[in-house]
Image (tube, grey):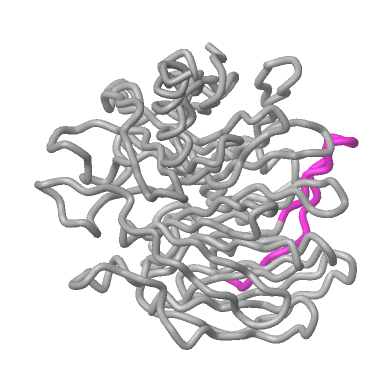
Amino acid sequence: MRKIAWLCFPALVLLIFGLNPLQAEITRNNIRYVEYPDFPEAHSTWGSIGYNRKYDKVYIGVTNHRDKVGLFEYDIAGQKMRLCGFLPDLAHLRDYQWQGKVHSQLVEGPDGNMYFTTDGGESREEFLMNHPHGYGGGFFFRWEPAAERLVNLGNGLRYESIKDLAVDQLSGKILGISYPQVHLLLYDPLKNELRDLGRVGSDHVPRVLFSDWFGNMYYDDWRQRLIKYEHETGRLLFSKDSLPAFEATPGYRVVTGITGYAADRVGGVIYLVTYSSKLLAFYPTRLGIGKVEDLGGIFEGPDVAPYDYYCPNLALGDNGMLYYFIGGHGSYVGGKEQNVLVEFNPQTRSKQVVLSFPLKEINEVTGANVKDSQGNLYFCGRRSDPQAERMGESGASRPFMIIFNPGREIN
């Protein structure tokens, strides 16, 4: 009897500390790459990915980072990627209505259609206004999978990009953010009604919006304070406190705000990652702004300030762990140019690097909260490619989609 008890003791310790003794080691067999066909000059993707539960498909906006944007569809059951078409053709845009990229998420609405927005691509087109063709402004779009039809829902503000959006899953209303003037835009597709809710920032523009299960939608302002559009009252609420940040975090990191999120409806929490390299747990409430819990930094290393890691992505596995890639924009883990995949346990706040990649394989990863019914996590990936066209500050790269499943081999 004593021998049996001692044999059980190690397993008991693992359970107490939140570790699963049966969880298999994560290897490269847990990750797979999918290329984008029929777009040889494709350069990058910018968090422009989303999952459609109704049709069990993933949608991605891919750009040459200049003037050509393709909409792609990944059929999960058939494991096949296809080009739906290019935006100018699908939406019957005129030359002066050109778009540089899809920077927003692609979000399924309560009607089962996918919603996204577009922008001019680079600061020279938008902020400096010196693009040779000018820039008329970004659009709200709806992709209807059943009809394979792209519907142009109209412009936001004239000359302004629309960097991201969130969708109220109860009413279908859309909240967007303009660039560079940082105006919150509320659009009702059922009424075709657009409201400018005013300017909520300055300098840099935070890039990420998100929603909760109560129909509320969120953004953060230039001091990293949460702004909530409240579904039930139709009001804007402003948090009195900024989101947690490390001491001495530079202002340019604070103003960039949230870079990714992952929702756990069962647990009643939405996890956030910030440009200041913080992981946060946000507990939304139907009315008012819920509490925020500081989970610590996304990584700790001897050679990098705790606020100086780059992580524009986040996902929650079926195992309850958070997963995110760190690397890009000159900020890397371990003192060498590599991209690493980190597993974070929200209960114990422990973290570990599970995989690492050279930049010629993965140099940057974007995308948030994209998970299918099988527990697969999806991200937008880019790899350094000297043969690709160099596009401004974004360099020479090739885009591809990343599928990752921490619980089983998929490659």
Can residue 124 be seen in this snapshot?
A: no
Q: Is residue 21 above or below residue 239?
A: above
Give the residue displayed 73% in from the left and 23% down from the top.
75
Q: In this orientation, which residue lies closer to the viewer: 184 or 393?
A: 184
Q: Which residues are magenta?
A: 141-159
**Is 40 left or right of 124, judged from the image as shown?**
right
Give the residue displayed 84% in from the left and 54% down from the top.
110
Q: In this orientation, which residue lies closer to the viewer: 33 or 393?
A: 33
Q: Position of residue 272 (x, y in %)?
A: 48, 58
**Is 169 left or right of 387, judged from the image as shown?**
right
Can residue 230 be seen in this snapshot?
A: yes
**Is 227 left or right of 206, judged from the image as shown?**
right
Q: Quadrant of residue 232?
A: bottom right
Q: Quadrant of residue 384?
A: top left
Q: Position of residue 195 (x, y in %)?
A: 72, 80
Q: Position of residue 330 (x, y in %)?
A: 21, 45
Does residue 407 show up magenta in the picture?
A: no
Q: In this orientation, which residue lies closer to the viewer: 190 or 243?
A: 243
Q: Position of residue 49 (x, y in %)?
A: 60, 41
Give the residue displayed 57% in from the left and 33% down from the top.
377
**Is 21 left or right of 263, judged from the image as shown?**
left
Number of callouts in the render?
Answer: 0
Give the residue displayed 33% in from the left and 41% down from the top.
326
Q: In this orientation, which residue lies closer to the viewer: 316 or 394?
A: 316
Does residue 155 show up magenta in the picture?
A: yes
